[in-house]
Image: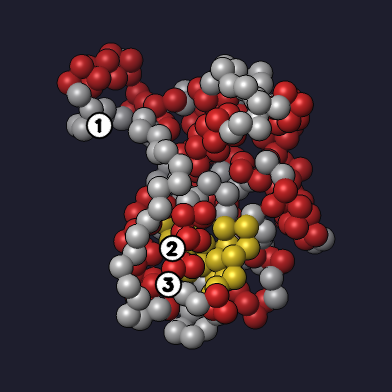
Amino acid sequence: MSAAPDTPVVFIHIAKTAGTSLTRVLQEHLPADRLAVRTHRPLATLPTADHARTVAVIREPLDRLVSAFAWLGGRPSVLWRGAVGNPDLAAELGLDRFAGPADFLDHFDAFYDDHVRPWADGLAAADRRLGDLMAFGHFNLFVPQHRYLVDARDDLAVGHLLRFEHLADDTAAWLDRVAPGHGPIVWPHLYPSRREPAAALASPRALAAVRDIYAADYALPGMAPSPAPIAAREPSPGLPPLARAVARAAAA
């Protein structure tokens, strides 16, 4: 499904799915009266009649998880090892006790149960008012993506899903339908990209925990497949020869 030309569009902005960049793009190509952006608020808080005209971006869950940790750790207002920021907020988030992303992934299942699950369960509750608080909390970065995309019956109800992994192509194809004749799409580069694959940071145990916690995300239509354990993967041919040799030795 996708909105027809001249139909207002609602963009469901899920944290850490390039939503800020896509918002800029949509604002360039859709008139203000045709676009509403709902940042970190679930689709279930919209009237049912509005669901068919929604669009959202989905991202491979492990990649999104590592990106969220790196983003929080790098923000001036947040403190974790090696950064200077707000110790009280860091303690509230529980990030200050992790040495880095690999350590965070190794303990993510406990972190999720202690800190994130109450937010995720709140989105699934009959009373969706908690959704309005999601825009103001930082734990929303770790809430499963599907929680933002289901209706009050917990059924997937978003009109159209774009994939983070090939967002430029998906966005262009979707805009061709909702804004025929749109001009060239120029993507802003608001945040630096992480080059190393997220799966390279995760132990087999951590990968299993991520697959379990985000099982419903991995089941979303068009979602990138769950990464294989490091030992079962051939190093990327794009790596330099020495890096490939090191990766093979580590996997042996």
Residue displayed at 76% across by 52% down: 133
Q: Dot 1 corresponds to which residue?
A: 236
How far is disc 2 from disc 3 in space, using C-alphas?
7 Å
Local packing at callout 1 (Cα closer than 10 Å; few below 14, some 14-19, many 20+) is few
Local packing at callout 3 (Cα closer than 10 Å; few below 14, some 14-19, many 20+) is some
Q: Which amino acid does label 3 sit on?
A: His
Residue at disc 1, secondary structure: loop
Residue at disc 3, secondary structure: helix
Residue 29 badge? 3
Local packing at callout 2 (Cα closer than 10 Å; few below 14, some 14-19, many 20+) is some
Residue displayed at 40% across by 34% down: 194
Q: Is residue 70 above or below residue 142?
A: above
Q: Dot 2 corresponds to which residue?
A: 25
Residue displayed at 67% across by 58% down: 41
Among the two numbered marks 1 and 3 on one chain, the one whose residue lies closer to the N terminus: 3
How far is disc 1 from disc 2 in space, using C-alphas?
31 Å
The answer to the question of whether label 2 and label 3 lie on touching residues, with beta carbons closer than 8 A, is yes
> Residue 151: where, in percent of width, then height?
66, 67
> Residue 54: where, in percent of width, then height?
55, 71
Residue 166 placement, left or right of 202: left
How many dots with numbers? 3
Q: What residue type is labelled 1?
A: Ser
The C terminus: image quadrant = top left
Residue at disc 2, secondary structure: helix
